[in-house]
Amino acid sequence: MIFLLDASQISDEDYYAEKQFVKDLAHHLNISLKGPRASAVIYGSNPQTVAEFSDPDFQGKVDKAPHLKTPRRVDKALNHAAEVFNTMGRNGSKIVVFLMLGNQVAIKEPIGQAANRLRFLGARAYPIVVGTAPTNKALAAVVEKPQDIFRVSSTAFLSSKIEGVSKRSKFFLYIIAIEILFFSF
């Protein structure tokens, strides 16, 4: 699982709330070296991996993630996530949970085109949108189903989505496990 944190030109309070949400969701999903693994990537103009799949201190790395305060480039973040999955060196479920606190700026590549790289790798994307932008129509090319888009009016309500995101991602993991069992016989 890769968490993409919006570290663009948002308030420090919103960025802190995002980091808390990611840590809480990771805890809820039992992210650890012995269980499901996660990587954390921050993005603005250029994405940066702040926690690798093998990092034993995922929570601490998320806490220390810098606030970039640069324009939002979701396309670059999604491409970076595809690169991280490509270099991960192991098979398994690939999930991207990404937070967006507004529209992408300076579009060089449509978000859907970047998402296609993830889809080609068998990854599933779950955007969590804070506010009204981007619209669900703009995100339709990123997700497999409309229910995969989560929306809150402000970062104060992010924690209300932990259960929903957890259920959707666990359901995807369950389907992948069944496919692996079925096709291995």
Image (cartoon, rainbow, N blue to C red):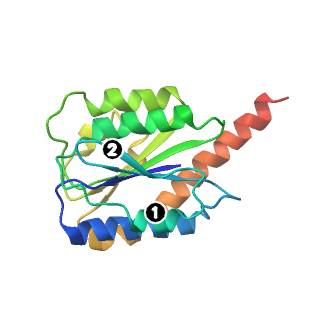
Q: Residue at x 39, y 66 (%)?
A: 64
Quarter location, residue 13: bottom left
- For the residues labelled 1 and 2, the Cα–Cα distance comes to 15 Å
Residue 57 position, x and y percent, is 55, 65
Note whether 151 is above or below 75 in the view shown.
below
Residue to which mark 2 is pinned: 47
> Mark 1 falls on what kind of element?
helix
Note whether 131 is above or below 44 in the view shown.
below
Residue 73 position, x and y percent, is 24, 41
Residue 22 position, x and y percent, is 43, 63
Residue 124 position, x and y percent, is 49, 40
Packing grade of label 2 (10 A; few <14, some 14-19, many >=20) is many
Q: Quadrant of the C terminus?
A: top right
144 relative to 11 in the view: left or right: right
Residue to which mark 1 is pinned: 61
Tags 1 and 2 in contact by the CB under 8 Å rule?
A: no
Lower sequence index among marks 1 and 2: 2
Q: Residue at x 53, y 31 (%)?
A: 86
